[in-house]
Amino acid sequence: MPYEKLEISTPKPVLSWANHALGEKETKMAENVASLPFVFKHVALMPDVHLGKGALVGSVIATKEAIIPAAVGVDIGCGMAAIKMPFKAHKLEGKLKQIRLDIEAAIPVGFSENKEVETTVTNWQGWGEFKELHQGVQHQNNKALKQMGSLGGGNHFIEVCVDTENFVWLMLHSGSRGIGNLLAQQHIETAKDLAKLAEINLADKDLAYFVAGTREFAAYWHDLQWAQDYARFNRDVMMNRFKRIVEKHVAGGKSVKPLLEVNCHHNYAEKEVHFGEDVYVTRKGAVRADVEDYGIIPGSMGAKSFIVKGKGNAESYCSCSHGAGRLMSRTQAKNVFTLDDFVRQTDGVECRKDEQFLDEIPGAYKSIDEVMSQQSDLVEVVATLKQVVCVKG
C-alpha cells in the first residue's frame, strides 16, 4: 500500500502507511514531532502506529544534528531474533510441554535474573566500556551482568514456531533489560533539564533533545550504542540456550546448523544516509528494511509472524513495522477479556494460560494480516510462521 500524507499543517510533512485515521492524541503527537526544527524531510509512520511517549510507536524520525532520547525510548535496542532450524515439525510431537518447561527453567523472565553467569557473558567485550557509561548506572554493574541472557517482562516472549513448509523456527523478543532502561532514564532527564535551563518551549517535554557537538550528545550517543550492543548480545545468549534445549529434545543434544539467522533492533537510533544526506535515524517501533535486510514482524501470541526482506523504500527511510501494534491498552484488555477468552484465542499454543497474561491476549492487538497488507511496498515475505510454544515475560 502506498503511503498517504497526513492533512496537518506542520513544517515537515508526515507520511503514514497506516490504513486508519489517527486519533486526536496520535495526531497531536505526530504534529509535535514534525514541528521540531531539526527534523529532516518528513516523518514516516508505519502500519502498526499507536500512542507512545513523546513520539508515536511505529514512527521513523530522521534528524539533522540532534537526537531525542525519549523518542528512542527506555527499552534501548529492543528487538527480535529468529533462527530457522534444519528439521520439520514432526520432530516436536509430544515434546512441546517439556520444551516450554525447560525454557522457563533455563531463561529468567520478568524481573528475574541468572543465578550463575556463564562464560560467554563474562567474556562479552562490552564490559570493558562499562566504566565509561553514565555515572547513574555504575552501581548496576553486577545486575547488568546477571541480567544478560534474561527475557524481561511485558510483551517480550520466546516462541517455537512452524512455517508454511513445516520447518521449525526459534524466535524471541527482548531488549537491553534494566541497564538500558536506567541509561535511557538518566539521559532523558538530562535532556529535560537542559531544555528547562535554555528555556526551550517544547510542545511535549518528552521531546527534549541533545544537539550534536555537545558533551551531552556525545555521552548519550556512546551509551545508546553500548545499550544497543548489549540488547543484541542478550538475544544471542538466550537464543543459544534456547537452541540447545530444542536440540536436546529433537537431535539428541547434537548441535545443528541453522538455515537462516536474523537479529534486528526495533527501538534504536543509527547514523545513516538518506536522500544523499547524513542523518540520525530513530526507529521507535520500526525495523530497518533496506534492500537485502532481513527483519522479523511478529503478530500476537495467537497469530502469525513473518520473516521479511526489505525493499529499501526511500520514503520510509528503508523501514517497516515491528509487529501488529496494540489495539487497546493493557488495562483495557484486562477489563474487556476473560481468562476463557484467552484460552480460546491461544488454542493450539503450548503456553501458560494464566490471568497474569491477559493483557497480552491476541484480541488486544491489531490484525497482523492487515498490517502486512499495508506494507507490501516496504518488504517481501520470506516465511510465514505460527507459534506452537510461547513463553511470555
Image (spheres, grey):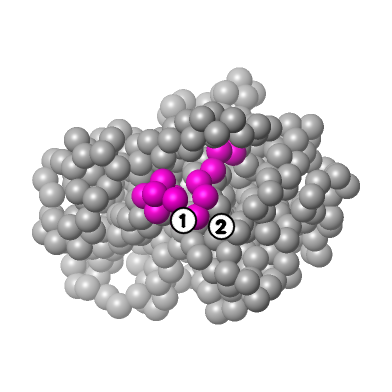
Whether 217 is among the magenta residues is yes
> Mark 2: which amino acid?
Glu
Residue 236 position, x and y percent, is: 30, 61
* Quadrant of the image containing the C terminus: top left
Q: Using residue 26 as the reference point, say whether residue 251 is left or right of it.
A: left
Q: Name the residue under label 1.
A: 213
Height in image: 317 above or below 9? below
Residue 166 position, x and y percent, is: 49, 70
Asked whether the beta carbons under mark 2 and mark 1 sit within 8 Å of each other, the answer is: yes
Residue placed farthest to the right in the image?
7
Among the two numbered marks 2 and 1 on one chain, the one whose residue lies closer to the N terminus? 2
Whether 132 is among the magenta residues is no
Q: Using residue 250 as the reference point, say whether residue 131 is left or right of it.
A: left
Q: Which of 41 and 372 is in front in this view?
A: 41
Label 2: how many Cα within 10 Å (few below 14, some 14–19, many 20+): some
Height in image: 97 above or below 306? above
Segment colored magenta: 206-219
Q: Nearer the viewer, residue 162 or 140?
A: 140
> Mark 1: which amino acid?
Gly
Where disc 1 sits, the SS reads loop
Residue placed farthest to the front in the image?
198
Q: Nearer the viewer, residue 69 or 324?
A: 69
Residue depicted at 67% across the width and 53% down the height = 39
* Quadrant of the image containing the N terminus: bottom right
Q: Residue 65: which disc? A: 2
Residue 105 position, x and y percent, is: 22, 43
- Using the rendered image of the protein, determine whether residue 271 is visible from the camera's viewpoint: yes
Residue depicted at 88% across the width and 47% down the height = 7
Residue depicted at 72% across the width and 47% down the height = 34
